[in-house]
Image (cartoon, rainbow, N blue to C red):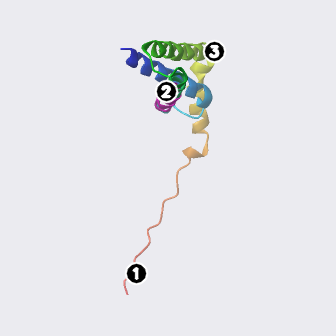
Amino acid sequence: MLATLFLVGAALFGACLVRRVLGRLLDGAETVMCGAVAGWALSTVFVYALARRQGQLTHTLMLWATAAAWLAAAVIILLQPAAEMIFSTTLRQESLSASSFSRPRAPMRRARARSE
């Protein structure tokens, strides 16, 4: 149970961190996927460093690391302005529709094979 809470908390922390840093560049699914990996990696490195310093990995250390991941995610969520959370997706969609991605591509010509 503690491992599941740790992984979910770490993924939430990573998603919040990625949304805070790269929110205007990534959409929702990209934020969640990249955030989960980033959160797992950062949290695991943090726990490894603490366990290495103490000389052992204990249940208490994992409990504190789980609480720290959830607390860090909560702090990031509370520090993000509510208006930014609501309008960031709308602003991103407007900027993409006006960008060069919306231009149609020119058709490619097929090379004719010459048989001689």
State which quadrant residue 7 falls in: top left
Judge whether residue 42 is colored magenta.
yes
Q: Which residue is mark 2?
A: 44
Observer-nearest residue: 97 or 67? Answer: 67
Residue 92: x and y in percent read 59, 31
Observer-nearest residue: 1 or 74? Answer: 1
Q: Secondary structure at mark 1?
A: loop
Residue 100: x and y in percent read 60, 46
- Contact, CB < 8 Å: mark 2 with mark 3? no
Q: Nearer the viewer, mark 1 or mark 2?
A: 2
Observer-nearest residue: 79 or 81? Answer: 79
> What amino acid does circle 2 point to?
Thr
Quadrant in which the N terminus is drawn: top left
Q: Which residue is mark 1?
A: 114
Q: CA distance from mark 1 to mark 3?
A: 66 Å
Which of pointers 1 and 3 lies earlier in the amino acid sequence? 3
Q: Secondary structure at mark 3?
A: helix
Residue 95: x and y in percent read 61, 35
Residue 57: x and y in percent read 45, 20
Q: Main secondary structure of the magenta part?
A: helix
Dot 3, how many residues are within 10 Å of its Cα: few (below 14), some (14-19), or many (20+)? few
Q: CA distance from mark 2 to mark 3?
A: 24 Å
Q: In this picture, is 67 found above or below 95? A: above
Observer-nearest residue: 61 or 110? Answer: 61
Q: In this picture, is 94 found above or below 112? A: above
Viewed as shown, does residue 101 lie left or right of 11?
right
Q: Nearer the viewer, mark 1 or mark 3?
A: 3
Q: CA distance from mark 1 to mark 2?
A: 60 Å
Dot 1, how many residues are within 10 Å of its Cα: few (below 14), some (14-19), or many (20+)? few
> What amino acid does circle 1 point to?
Arg
Q: Which residue is mark 3?
A: 79
Which region of the structure is painted magenta? 33-44
